[in-house]
């Protein structure tokens, strides 16, 4: 496994447990603060460097996390209110090339993440045991995914990208 590409490892689905539910919900709750801390005091020159060879820039990465987690909130709402809705995939590489990512400072996406995660945390706190079993269909992967699986995936996703930035800072001593 490439430690630069997967600094916290690859997402491994886990069986439901109350302890893990609590842990993952805390990771969702605190991700905006952790990501904000990871980029603290980075200047524009550093923000526009790739976090690993062949990877996006840190600037793109922060915008990507906001885009991804905005989609996650919507996916959870659809999963809670519809029967096995189909997830709308999107081209992440194309999205990081769009004008909002290119032209806006990362504080816009960090602010957005704070709001998204407040709403998402409120939604997660109200979920019942049976809600975690609700499914969505992902056409790109051709499989159903439970909301439990998705919670773990997005908790991992936030740690994954925060670790990209922290490892970059360690390597570059910035």
Image (spheres, grey):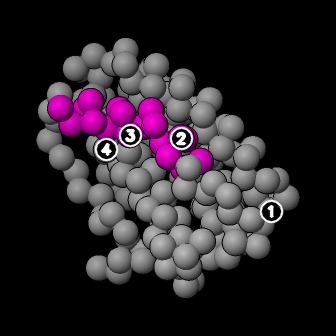
Residue 6, quarter of picture: bottom left
Q: Residue 26 in magenta?
A: yes
Q: Residue under circle 2? A: 33
Residue appearing at x 73%, y 46% in the figure: 107
- Marks 2, 1: nearer the viewer: 2
How packed is label 4: few (under 14 Cα within 10 Å), some, or many (20 or more)?
Answer: many
Give the answer, above or below, for where 6 lies relative to 129.
Answer: below
Residue 128 visible to the viewer:
yes
The answer to whether marks 1 and 3 mark residues whose Cβ atoms lie closer than 8 Å is no
Mark 3 vs 2, N-terminal side:
3
Q: Residue under circle 1? A: 102
Residue 146 visible to the viewer:
no
Image spot of residue 95 (x, y percent): 69, 59
- Marks 3, 2: nearer the viewer: 2
Mark number displayed over residue 152: 4
126 or 132, which lies in front?
126
Image spot of residue 51 (x, y percent): 57, 73
- Marks 1, 3: nearer the viewer: 3
Location of the N terminus by quadrant is bottom left
Relative placement, left or right, of 9 versus 86 is: left
The Cα atoms of the two marked residues, 2 and 4, are separated by: 19 Å
Image spot of residue 12 (x, y percent): 23, 56
Region in magenta: 19-36
Give the answer, above or below, for where 113 lies relative to 89.
Answer: above
Magenta span: chief secondary structure: helix
Residue appearing at x 37%, y 19% in the figure: 125
Q: Residue under circle 3? A: 27
């Amino acid at each position: 496994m490439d430690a630069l590409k997967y600094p916290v490892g690859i997402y491994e689905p886990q069986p439901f447990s109350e302890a893990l539910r609590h842990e993952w919900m805390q990771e969702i709750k605190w991700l905006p603060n952790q990501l904000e801390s990871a980029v603290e005091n980075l200047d524009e020159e550093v923000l526009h460097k790739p976090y690993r060879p062949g990877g996006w820039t840190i600037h793109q990465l922060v915008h990507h996390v906001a885009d991804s987690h905005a989609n996650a909130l919507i996916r959870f709402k659809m999963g809670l209110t519809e029967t096995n809705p189909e997830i709308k995939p999107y081209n992440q590489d194309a999205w990081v090339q769009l004008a909002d990512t290119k032209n806006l400072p990362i504080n816009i996406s960090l602010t957005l993440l704070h709001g998204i995660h407040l709403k998402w945390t409120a939604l997660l706190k109200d979920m019942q045991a049976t809600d975690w079993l609700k499914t969505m269909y992902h056409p790109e992967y051709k499989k159903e995914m439970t909301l439990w699986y998705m919670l773990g995936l997005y908790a991992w996703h936030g740690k994954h990208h925060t670790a990209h930035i922290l490892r970059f800072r360690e390597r570059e001593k910035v």
